[in-house]
Image: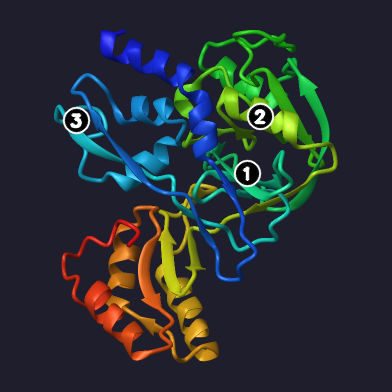
Amino acid sequence: MTSARAFGVLLAALCCLPCLAENRHILTSETNTDLVGNNSSTNISREETLIDIAVRYQLGYNMIRSANPDVDAWLPDDGSNVLLPFSVILPDAPRTGIVINTAEMRLYFYHRDEQQNDTVTVYPISVGRRDWATPLTETRVTMKIEHPPWYPPDSIRAEHAARGDILPKIVPAGPDNPLGDYLLALDIPSYFIHGTNKRFGIGMQVTHGCIRMYPEHIGELYNLAPVNTPVSIVNQPYKIGWKEEKLYLEVHHPLELDGVAQEENRTGIVDKLTSILEKQPEVLIDWNRVDIAITKATGIPVLVGIQPHSLSDFEYYRNHIRSDHSNQPDMIE
């Protein structure tokens, strides 16, 4: 391990608590508040990779990769600026308990903080690979286990055996256990939310259907989420939401499920925006920005419209949206 990479791993451990705070957001009582968080950035050294940056800042690799398409994931230029995508649009789902959006590989936990504020904490996750897709369903937490043993199913043992890796029937708790130190069992046989002993896999489609989290994140969720917490698992590769009178669009690359690439986002996005216009015809949408956001699919909320109420709003729209011809609407405005 190079000195830079070793330092990155150490820094990830030292900085886990600030990163947890960065992912926690107080929800306001305002109706049009679907967007939370603020993006940040950092510089990367030549000896680091985007996976190192993802681990350091407790983000998923998919988020870092999509948000920085011009940065070489494995051999970046020394000093390259890397966008840290902490800003998100909340999924179109009830804001209660745990909501998992497989498409963006994030878990949202709605709860009350120590001051009784309505809060959402956002965690990066790994989900089922294309031939072991994470099920889309409504379920609940049925059990919480600290230091869980792993009983690999026969199918997984056979898969490992084909590679010459013979798994025991029981893998005890410890550094070789892929479940990590904490596990939340769901009311779906053999599907769990759990930690990991390999933190470099978060933000990838690599599990056998379970939800995998950073060790620090599952430890926090384990302590906060009681048994019977509702769990909604959805697949939303695009999200549309308001912040005050500004309309944002967040687009992700669709997952591959059952070995088949899912249909493109464009039709669904256009239909949803058209539905908004039918209900609120005064809304102004920049369709050029919508098209660029769909094409780039950076996973970053992009300003695509406003709800004007005065002439000054129209002036704002002209100056802040229509005048932008950079074809790079990647940052929240």
Looking at the picture, does residue 114 appear above or below residue 51? below
Pointer 1 with pointer 3, Cβ within 8 A: no
Residue 166, quarter of picture: top right
183 relative to 243 in the view: left or right: right
Identify the residue position indicated by label 3 in the image. 76
User: What residue sits 48% from the left and 79% below the top?
Assistant: 271
Mark 3: amino acid: Pro
Mark 2 or 3, closer to the camera: 2
Residue under the image location 60 percent in, 9 percent down: 176
Q: Position of residue 240 (x, y in %)?
A: 49, 67
For the residue labelled by badge 1, is the local secondary structure a helix, a strand or a loop? loop
The disc label shown at residue 35, or none: none
Q: Which residue is mark 1?
A: 134
Residue type beneath disc 1 = Thr
Q: First in sequence: mark 2 or mark 3?
A: 3
Q: How is the image coloured?
A: rainbow
User: Which of pointers 1 and 2 indicates the residue nearer the eye?
Assistant: 2
Q: In what element is the residue under mark 2?
A: helix
> Closer to the observer: label 1 or label 3?
3
